[in-house]
Amino acid sequence: MICPRPAPGTHPPNNSPGYRSTILRHPKEPLVIIPHTLSELTGPVYPYGRINVTDSDLTRQHPGEPLGERIIVQGRVLDEDGRPIPKTLVEVWQANAAGRYAHRIDDHPAPLDPNFSGAGRTLTDDEGRYRFVTIRPGAYPWRNHPNAWRPAHIHFSLFGSIFLSRLVTQMYFPGDPLMPIDPVLNSIPDERARQRLVSNFDLNVTEPEWALGYTFDIVLRGSNATPMET
Amino acid sequence: MAGLTPFQTLGPFFDFGLVIHDGDLVARPGAEGRHILIEGVVRDGAGEPLPDGLVEVWQANAAGRYRHPGDGNNRTLDPAFDGFGRVATDTCGRFSFKTVMPGRVAGPDGKLQAPHLAVGVLARGLLTRLVTRMYFEDEASNADDQILALVPAERRHTLIAKAGGPDRYRFDIQLQGEGETVFFDV
């Protein structure tokens, strides 16, 4: 099989009532299982839109420096056999250090930062590596349940090499006390799978007197080594 | 085998990070083929439009070739055609794409599939990407399509865009409830 289906428990069920917004948005009819054809085993592998140097350094997109704790987030994008996925688009977006998104409908009464937009993009290198410089995002409240707060997180979007390898996810920070009570993270049934979304603090990535470093490797569906058939 | 990285929701605040310039332009104006407009609305189980959804499409060019190294057939690539589109829904849940009618591509055992787009739907309140397909009304080859044949007959209509004028197609996406769109386990 070219692209095995994910192990049970890896992905969250769309019907996860603890995350209230899923209630009216998850399909109730069973998903129809289909074989993989060229339509699923090809996909948008070429970069869309221009990528500038400052797109991967979210602290350099404005005249001044953003407020907050400067961090480096880097990692590798791999296929299911652990092979790197080169030249694949990685997009990120996040709240600022105060926990506020630069988004028109975010009404959390925390300050916007004129020097921080919170969106970035880059391509992986030949070894599947990516690297962002950014600001550690703040936790923020949401209205899912009384006194609900999202743990600090950075949103990630990746394409990988085929339509089936598309992934949108969130990266969390080690030791965040909000993680055990977050309905979004805990919608993932398998504890080991949940742990894969928690980045590692890494002193080797940390740059002295400048920024703490975190590593976050990402494994996408599919195998780059397997020749694709029609 | 390494463990897969799990999905998480897009959340409500994605559009400053994910919307791409000309994301609705699946085929550029000079692309070969019949140029068409696809438009639709994404709705939830209460019939409310989603103002914070993201719709992505992927398709072959008019000759039936994907711009991807995995497509080894010798039909011609079209320099004005990439085949990918991505748009956020507007405040009324609407989305649209400008593209060309896709050619037919090989199916499970080499038989040609009916013209279709692969479609992914992401949103706040969706913890994964929902995958579906869009086919076209009045395509005779729909009757022989092996993927459509796997869908219960009474629900097939949810995958078929309706002609809504010359070179315009309407494809609504119902996440839940009456007329729920067929989504695939891929």
Image (cartoon, helix red, strand yellow):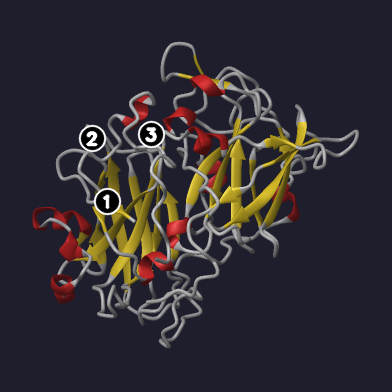
Name the image quarter holding the N terminus of chain A: bottom left
Q: Residue furthest front?
A: B1
> What's the mark number on residue B125?
3
* Residue type (three-letter) at the residue carrying disc 3: Gly
Query: Given the image, what chain letter belongs to the residue carrying mark 1?
Result: B
User: Disc 3 and disc 2: Cα gap in Å?
Assistant: 12 Å
- Snapshot quadrant of residue B25: bottom left
Name the image quarter holding the C terminus of chain A: bottom left
Query: Given the image, what chain letter belongs to the residue carrying mark 3?
Result: B
Q: Are marks 2 and 1 on the same chain?
A: yes
Residue bearing the label numbered 2:
B45
Residue bearing the label numbered 1:
B183
> What's the mark number on residue B105?
none
- Snapshot quadrant of residue A85: bottom right
* Residue type (three-letter) at the residue carrying disc 2: Gly
User: Disc 1 and disc 3: Cα gap in Å?
Assistant: 16 Å
Report x, y in % for residue B7: 47, 42
Marks 2 and 1 close (CB-CB < 8 Å)? no
Report x, y in % for residue B100: 35, 72
Which residue is at a point 47% across and 63% down the rendered structure image?
A162
Question: Can the viewer see residue B116 in this picture?
Answer: yes
Front position among marks 1 and 3: 1
- Structural crowding at the residue carrying mark 1, measured as other residues with C-alpha within 10 Å and reported as few (<14), some (14–19) or many (≥20): many
Which residue is at a point 18% across and 54% down the rendered structure image?
B158
* Residue type (three-letter) at the residue carrying disc 1: Phe
Task: Please tell me which of labels 3 and 2 falls first in the chain.
Answer: 2
Which secondary structure, mark 3?
loop
Which residue is at a point 25% across and 74% down the rendered structure image?
B113
Q: How many numbered marks are there?
A: 3
